[in-house]
Amino acid sequence: MRKGAYILFLTFRRPCTINAGALGPLTIGEGEYCYVGSAMNGLDSRISRHLSKQKKIRWHIDHLTMAADGTEAFISTEIKECELARAAEDSGCKPVFKGFGSSDCRCATHLFLTSTDSKEELLRASAVLPFS
């Protein structure tokens, strides 16, 4: 079983509102977002679960993956989750929803709004690999 961190890029063609548990209702605008996470026991199964529309809602990200119009995943077995979150922000990705996906660390969030330029920079800087 591989362990590591991952980036999910989530595309929304139109705004939507999700209920994210303790964070309450969150309105997601049109655009592409990136979410950073990790799996210390089963990276492949975690990402496969995120990409599936057939699942029980367990985490904040599940609400987004169920509502997204498209999802793309990248992995790293070298870089840790919080390092990827910092790389996302350093690449120009805009933090959204304080506390989203970061309840077990000191990061403000693990969810970011991306642009074409910030996505390309994040992929280049982090050297993540496409999930397959």
Image (cartoon, rainbow, N blue to C red):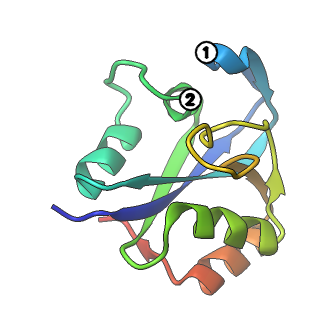
Which residue is label 1 attached to? Answer: 21
Which residue is label 2 attached to? Answer: 60
Q: Is residue 26 above or below residue 3?
A: above
Element type at mark 1: helix
Q: Is residue 78 above or below residue 56?
A: below
> Distance from label 1 to label 2 (Cα)?
7 Å
Direction left: furthest residue? 1
Element type at mark 2: helix
Identify the residue shown where x is 60% and y is 77%.
Answer: 123
Q: Is residue 86 left or right of residue 62?
A: right
Name which residue type carries label 2.
Answer: His
1 or 2: tag closer to the N-terminus:
1
Q: Position of residue 40 (x, y in %)?
A: 31, 55
Identify the residue shown where x is 56% and y is 29%.
Answer: 60
Q: Is residue 36 left or right of residue 5?
A: right
Q: Position of residue 11 (x, y in %)?
A: 64, 45
Q: Position of residue 104 (x, y in %)?
A: 56, 42
Quick one: label 2, few (<14), some, or many (20+) residues within 10 Å?
some
Q: Is residue 118 left or right of residue 45?
A: right
In which quadrant will I find the N terminus?
A: bottom left
Q: Is residue 69 left or right of residue 100?
A: left
Residue 3 or 131: which is nearer the viewer? 3
Q: Is residue 2 above or below residue 109?
A: below
